[in-house]
């Protein structure tokens, strides 16, 4: 039987989020029903609600940093049982057969991955609804196992902010002693700092906010570079092995490219929109590279969660009630969050 769930969503790009009731599909053979305990608030939720990327269909029910407990499993579920602590990230389905899926890169599914919200819903029609709700039904292949030894509230942001920063650090093989820059100390950036530190890199937090310097060091940065300070930027020129750029909007890239060593790469994960023009010389002079990265595959997400279990890594969070979501959105937009809001879903039940 289809179930209903309480939710919060937006009816248009200019509307506040408000209470709604949504349907969840009947449990299929390989489905898991999850009672949601916590859901992180990603800047992508806000971009989607505000239609910044132009593809939003309303109502939008955001949320792709989901932590919960399994309450029911379909007859063919073999990976999970009732009571397990689990997570759902940015994807809930993919074709499982294309070249990308076979290589554990479901996020690049050639037939189109089904994202957790605002993606065509194959079962119910319409759009998928995310984690700002009391429950979710998900195929077991897209459910992650969450280590029981880490705080489940702080684990929620690992499902997006965590994997989005972990994946490029691993793909570009960041290693002990590398000089790694993380640009932007927000939800993604603070996880980037923690992971780069845990991988043994010399971590430099590159920020527009001098008042975040102490926090950056507490989180694992060895140095802080204020990007508006041109002398400091010059002092770090041509010295970075790798830079992870989490700035959420289009921006001038030349100042950051000047920081890279010969053959080094800057990976964009934030600005999923037009970047400002950059000077070809910024790449040519030093054979430098700019690349992009999108979340990570399911296997890699599980590896990241296991690493967090072993190293006791979670996000630094501020817990809110569902009813305070609109204020939280305003604060993220004003760059006033330390460093991720997480909704306590008990407030909606
Ligand atoms: P966030 O918490 O708002 O953090 C972004 C940080 O960027 C801010 O804290 C700020 O740090 C810095 N910043 C903001 N505006 C800036 C500007 N105009 N110029 C320079 N720096 C600026 O956002 P988030 O949740 O980490 O997400 C970051 C971006 O990644 C968003 O666009 C989101 O949609 C995207 N995202 C991408 C993926 C992916 O798979 N590629 C996954 C998740 C999210 P400082 O104060 O330190 O400067
Ligand atoms: Zn996200």
Image: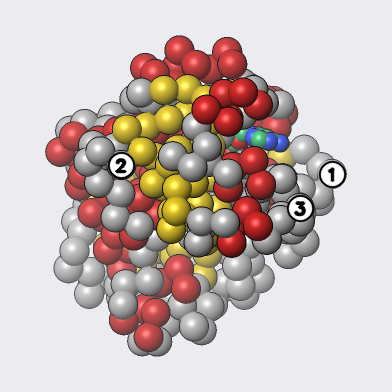
Local packing at callout 2 (Cα closer than 10 Å; few below 14, some 14-19, many 20+) is some
Earlier sequence position, callout 2 versus callout 3? 2
- Position in image of residue 328 (x %, y %): 64, 28
Q: CA distance from mark 1 to mark 3?
A: 26 Å
Q: Position of residue 172 (x, y in %)?
A: 35, 57
Q: CA distance from mark 2 to mark 3?
A: 28 Å
Residue count near mark 1 (Cα–Cα under 10 Å), binned few <14, some 14–19, many ≥20: few
Residue 241 appears anywhere in the view: yes
Q: Quadrant of the N terminus?
A: bottom left
Which residue lies at the image location 32% right of the left edge and 72% below the top edge?
104
Q: Which residue is mark 2?
A: 178
Crowding at mark 3 (Cα within 10 Å: few <14, some 14-19, many 20+)? few
Q: Is residue 135 visible?
A: no
Task: Name the foreground residue: 184 vs 256.
Answer: 256
Residue 139 lies, with reference to residue 42, above or below; the image says below
Q: Is 312 on the left or on the right of 336, as rendered? A: left
| Mark 3 lies on residue | 276
* Disc 3 residue lies near ligand 1 with CB under 8 A: no
Left or right of 79, for residue 194: right
* For residue 301, side relative to residue 51 (left or right): left
Quarter of the image for residue 93 reads: bottom left
- The local secondary structure at tag 2 comes to loop
Which one is in front in this view, the residue at disc 2 or the one at disc 3?
2
Q: Secondary structure at mark 1?
A: loop
Q: Position of residue 106 (x, y in %)?
A: 40, 72
- Residue in the picture at 43% in, 58% down: 263
Q: Are marks 1 and 3 in contact (CB under 8 Å)?
A: no
Q: Decide: is 287 above or below 64.
A: below
Q: Name the residue located 45 percent from the left edge and 16 percent from the top edge.
A: 215
User: Residue at label 1?
Assistant: 14
């Amino acid at each position: 039987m289809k179930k209903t769930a309480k939710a919060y969503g937006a009816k248009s790009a200019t509307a506040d989020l408000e209470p709604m009731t949504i349907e969840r599909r009947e449990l299929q053979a390989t489905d898991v029903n999850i009672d949601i305990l916590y859901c992180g608030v990603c800047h992508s939720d806000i971009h989607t609600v505000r239609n910044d990327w132009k593809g939003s269909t309303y109502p939008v029910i955001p949320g792709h940093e989901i932590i919960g407990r399994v309450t029911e499993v379909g007859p063919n579920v073999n990976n999970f049982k009732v009571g397990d602590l689990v997570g759902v990230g940015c994807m809930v389905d993919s074709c499982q057969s294309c070249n990308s899926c076979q290589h554990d890169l479901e996020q690049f599914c050639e037939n189109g991955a089904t994202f957790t919200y605002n993606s065509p819903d194959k079962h119910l029609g319409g759009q998928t609804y995310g984690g700002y709700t009391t429950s979710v039904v998900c195929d077991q292949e897209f459910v992650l196992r969450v280590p029981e030894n880490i705080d489940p509230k702080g684990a929620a942001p690992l499902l997006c902010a965590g994997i989005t920063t972990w994946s490029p650090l691993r793909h570009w093989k960041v290693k002990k002693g590398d000089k790694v820059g993380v640009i932007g100390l927000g939800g993604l950036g603070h996880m980037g700092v923690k992971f780069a530190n845990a991988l043994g890199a010399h971590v430099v937090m590159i920020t527009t906010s001098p008042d975040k310097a102490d926090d950056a060091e507490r989180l694992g940065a060895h140095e802080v570079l204020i990007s508006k300070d041109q002398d400091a930027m010059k002092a770090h020129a041509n010295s970075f092995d790798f830079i992870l750029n989490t700035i959420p909007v289009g921006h001038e890239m030349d100042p950051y490219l000047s920081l890279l060593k010969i053959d080094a790469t800057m990976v964009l994960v934030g600005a999923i929109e037009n970047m400002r023009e950059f000077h070809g010389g910024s790449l040519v002079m030093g054979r430098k590279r700019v690349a992009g990265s999108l979340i990570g595959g399911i296997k890699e997400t599980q590896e990241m969660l296991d690493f967090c279990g072993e190293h006791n890594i979670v996000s630094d969070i501020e817990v809110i009630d569902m009813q305070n979501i609109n204020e939280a959105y305003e604060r993220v937009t004003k760059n006033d969050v330390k460093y991720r809001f997480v909704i306590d879903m008990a407030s909606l039940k």
